[in-house]
Amino acid sequence: MSPDPTFSNAYEDAERASAYAQLDFAGTYFLAFRDLPALFKAHVEGTRALDFGCGAGRSTRFLKRLGFQTIGVDISPAMLEQARSVDPDGDYRLITDDNTLAGLPGPFDLILAAYPFDNIPTDSTKLNALQALRRVLAPGGRVVVIVSAPELYLHEWVSFSTKDFAENRTAGDGDRVRIAILDGPDHRPVDDILTSDARYRELFAEVGLSVVTLAKPLGNSSDGIAWGTETRVPPWSIHVLSHAEAEDAE
């Protein structure tokens, strides 16, 4: 994989962080979180949680409301500033590439990674992050990785637009794709890295994580949202992972 050298993580930008902090769980984002409580109930035991790539703290606060004792970590000081301003009593910590997750009070029963892998540009960096998560995962614990399905970059959605990015149509694993977030005040294109579910499964296996289940949520009429593409094409892939040896034992 050779990502575009001009790729940048938009969420390290202070203006983008401020706009992203205003997002909640409306629109297409709702589908990424709607089914998480049921998934946690079915697969997670214990309440020690890590929110990896917490950004402005939206997902950290979500976990806290569900009763998890949660630490949020991110590489973006701008994002963490937003998280602390909204949730001053929360535990938000800056991490860096060279000491990822060092010193955290693990192990954790649940590790949630909501979207950060969309913005990690190389396989090697993804693997380093996954290895770090596996090291702080408790025996019997679960990692829940939410990523953009490749189809997200090919359609129009309640919360996103891709119509101006024809290059997305020919992108493959490891290529840069672009998308505009329609929710919130900042509609500048975001750079992501396309990664298929099959490729993620290979990366998980390489670091000793097994896929327990894969959820692909679709919108329905009971959601109370005027869905478009969301009723027929799943925008998100939710991978529930465990230690590989634990799955072998079962």
Image: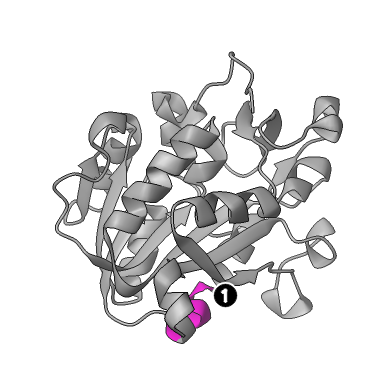
Per the picture, the main secondary structure of the magenta-coloured stretch is: helix
**Toward which corner of the image does residue 146 lie, by quadrant?**
bottom right
**Toward which corner of the image does residue 197 lie, by quadrant?**
bottom right
Q: Is residue 39 magenta?
A: yes
Q: Is residue 27 visible?
A: no
Q: Position of residue 233 (x, y in %)?
A: 81, 60
Q: Residue at x 42, y 49 (%)?
A: 130
Left or right relative to 35: residue 139: left
Work out whether residue 41 or residue 30 is closer to the camera in this orientation and state it.
Answer: 41
The magenta span reads 36-41
Q: Residue at x 49, y 27 (%)?
A: 9
For mark 1, what is the residue? 35
Q: Is residue 66 magenta?
A: no
Q: Residue at x 39, y 25 (%)?
A: 14
Q: Residue at x 42, y 33 (%)?
A: 17
Say how the picture is coloured: one colour
Q: Position of residue 42 (x, y in %)?
A: 48, 85
